[in-house]
Amino acid sequence: MTHTFRNTVFAVGAALAAAGAFASGTHAGGHGHDAEAAVGKPGVAAKVTRTVQVDMTDSMRFTPADIKVRQGETVRFVVKNSGVLKHELVLGTEKALLAHYEAMKKNPEMEHADPNMVTLAAGKTGEIVWQFTQAGKVDFGCLQPGHYDAGMKGAVLVGKAGK
Ligand SMILES: [Cu+2]
């Protein structure tokens, strides 16, 4: 058990380190095509061009679950937890979400907070301000244990700039 726990801590530490690296905007390596760059970066509130309201419920759904934005846009997600359970909205690649979800299952009490996510108690509303820098699909999900498996996920489709 100790071994498993240590692995979990390691995985979570690595995830947080990666998040920290892209939160800073200029990360040391400067390689431009990693997963973090593909999903975008934390946005600046003054540059918000679109506000999207997202509702989360105990039926394990986001409404809406499909969101369309344009490349370059800075979006303010106003996220409401209409349920009784704790829920969260985490933006990322599907791979990153799954890795984080597995870590959360092993350690449900794990506290996590990064610019790409908002975790909300029942009845609360919170925000994510995020800039979508590349065209394509950015996934999102609720990583509370059991929720992602139950279908609590969605996607932001980012259209090419100027189209
Ligand atoms: Cu949830």
Image (cartoon, helix red, strand yellow):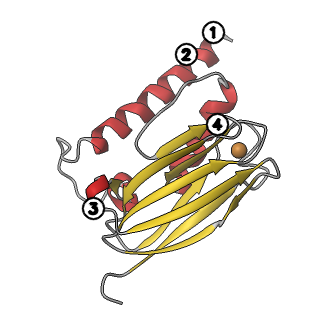
Pick the residue in front: 6 or 57.
57
Residue 21, horizontal then vertical, whole percent: 28, 39
- In the picture of the structure, the residue carrying the numbered disc 1 is 2
Q: In this rendering, would 39 be left or right of 6?
A: left
- In the picture of the structure, the residue carrying the numbered disc 3 is 47
Evaluate if marks 1 and 2 touch, with contact meaning CB atoms under 8 Å apart: yes
Look at label 4 and name its amino acid.
Glu
Between label 2 and label 4, give the one nearer the viewer. 4
Disc 4: CA contacts within 10 A as few (<14), some (14-19) or many (>=20)? some
Disc 2/disc 3 C-alpha distance (Å): 41 Å
Decide which of tag 3 and tag 1 comes sooner along the chain: 1
- In the picture of the structure, the residue carrying the numbered disc 4 is 102
Q: Where does the N terminus fall, quadrant-wise?
A: top right
- Residue at (65, 65) in percent of width and height: 65
Disc 3: CA contacts within 10 A as few (<14), some (14-19) or many (>=20)? some
Name the secondary structure under disc 1: helix
Disc 3/disc 1 C-alpha distance (Å): 46 Å
Disc 2/disc 4 C-alpha distance (Å): 14 Å
Evaluate if marks 3 and 4 touch, with contact meaning CB atoms under 8 Å apart: no
Q: In this rendering, would 159 be left or right of 37?
A: right
